[in-house]
Image (cartoon, rainbow, N blue to C red):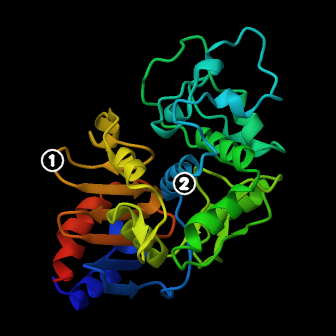
């Protein structure tokens, strides 16, 4: 399949690939694919959902490099001395930044408290109410989108800057990408529209009423943005000859820290980044609707894909490897 055939395949697709808006690929330091669908242009942005978590993984590394975070075993509660812990709660004192990054932090309840958190005035403090529990630290993987909100709070309190400003100054702008702005509204109706609207968005980031970004979702990026971030990771934290993140942290971030179960395709998990295979240097930041940053060290390629809201898309890695990579040669 060549590039023209790939474009036609997506244009005519009625299945999982029908929602793709942009694909952008960088291989051997050259842009080798730049294509768009559904009225999108290369510079348009889209809510990339949980790819946002992969960006937060990088921001945690930058905060660590700069000394705002002492080490990844530092306790979460070190950063919230003014938070009143609920009576009888002990586990919360044992939770570390590493637990947040590997999704092994424990939470009370069986499901995420979306309504309680997303209707509160301070989403970080609201989710802290659910951190911990009677079972202690078990090391069990528990995918918690809202839990990553705590990481944004840590970065803000440690650096003295809003997380969006920290990201702009230390990641997006050094990569030559547009700075993000706060989305502004956080009403129930607006949250629904933010997920479901299929039109291009600004370079924005969703936030709570305090102006703190939603760390588990809500970052708007283009496929170009994502491929550029992937290129940074591919090159061990260096971009344009400049060190953005330490190579030591990038290596640790991509290392498998936990093996996932059948629900997550038995992939390996690093620090908010996935390793789909046990025996290949392939890594990804993955979000709902097929949004993805895909990097393949063996082929020296970084791919970004955006897509409008569409449920249950889990095969973008397979799609990239079966359809996109062959079109790059």
Q: Is residue 313 visible?
A: no
Q: Tag 2 or tag 1, which sits nearer the N-term?
A: 2
- At 17% from the left and 64% from the top, the residue drawn is 298
Point out the image quarter for the C terminus: bottom left
Q: Is residue 192 left or right of residue 20?
A: right
Q: Where does residue 221 sit, x and y in percent of width and height? A: 54, 71
Q: Is residue 315 left or right of residue 172?
A: left
Which residue is at the far bottom? 4
**In the rendered image, which quarter is residue 125 located in?**
top right
Q: Nearer the viewer, mark 1 or mark 2?
A: 2
Compared to residue 271, the image places residue 2 above or below, namely below
Q: Is residue 73 visible?
A: yes
Q: Where does residue 284 sit, x and y in percent of width and height? A: 35, 56
Compared to residue 45, the image places residue 284 above or below, namely above
**The residue tagged with tag 2: helix, strand or loop?**
helix
Compared to residue 108, the image places residue 102 above or below, namely below
Compared to residue 177, the image places residue 144 above or below, namely above
Residue under circle 2? 62
Residue under circle 1? 279
Proximity of marks 1 and 2: CB atoms separated by less than 8 Å: no
Circle count: 2
Q: Where does residue 274 sit, x and y in percent of width and height? A: 35, 48
**The residue tagged with tag 1: helix, strand or loop?**
loop
- At 79% from the left and 65% from the top, the residue drawn is 184
Mark 1 and mark 2: span between their CA atoms? 28 Å
Crowdedness of circle 2 by 10 Å Cα count: few (<14), some, many (20+)?
many
- At 64% from the left and 75% from the top, the residue drawn is 203
Work out whether residue 199 or residue 183 is closer to the camera in this orientation and state it: 183
């Amino acid at each position: 399949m060549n590039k023209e055939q790939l474009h036609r395949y997506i244009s005519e697709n009625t299945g999982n690939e029908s929602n793709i808006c942009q694909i952008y690929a960088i291989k051997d330091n050259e842009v080798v694919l730049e294509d768009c669908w559904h009225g999108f242009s290369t510079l348009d942005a889209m809510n990339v959902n949980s790819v946002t978590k992969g960006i937060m993984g990088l921001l945690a590394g930058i905060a660590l490099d700069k000394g705002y975070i002492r080490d990844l075993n530092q306790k979460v509660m070190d950063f919230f001395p003014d938070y009143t812990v609920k009576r009888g709660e002990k586990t919360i004192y044992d939770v570390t930044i590493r637990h947040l990054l590997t999704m092994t932090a424990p939470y009370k309840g069986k499901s995420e408290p979306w309504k309680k958190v997303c209707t509160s005035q301070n989403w970080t403090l609201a989710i802290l109410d659910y951190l911990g529990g009677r079972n202690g630290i078990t090391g069990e993987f528990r995918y918690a989108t809202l839990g990553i909100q705590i990481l944004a709070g840590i970065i803000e309190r440690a650096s003295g800057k809003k997380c969006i400003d920290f990201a702009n100054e230390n990641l997006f702008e050094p990569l030559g990408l547009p700075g993000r702005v706060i989305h502004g509204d956080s009403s129930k109706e607006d949250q629904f529209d933010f997920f479901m609207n299929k039109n291009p968005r600004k370079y924005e980031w969703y936030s709570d009423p305090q102006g703190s970004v939603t760390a588990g979702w809500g970052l708007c990026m283009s496929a170009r943005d994502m491929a550029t971030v992937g290129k940074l990771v591919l090159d061990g934290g260096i971009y344009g000859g400049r060190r953005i993140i330490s190579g030591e942290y990038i290596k640790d971030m991509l290392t498998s820290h936990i093996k996932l179960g059948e629900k997550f395709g038995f992939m390996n998990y690093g620090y908010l980044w996935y390793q789909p295979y046990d025996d290949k240097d392939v890594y990804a930041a993955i979000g709902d609707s097929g949004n993805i940053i895909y990097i393949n060290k063996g082929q020296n390629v970084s791919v970004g894909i955006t897509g409008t809201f569409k449920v249950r898309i889990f095969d973008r890695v397979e799609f990239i490897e079966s359809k996109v990579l062959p079109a790059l040669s």
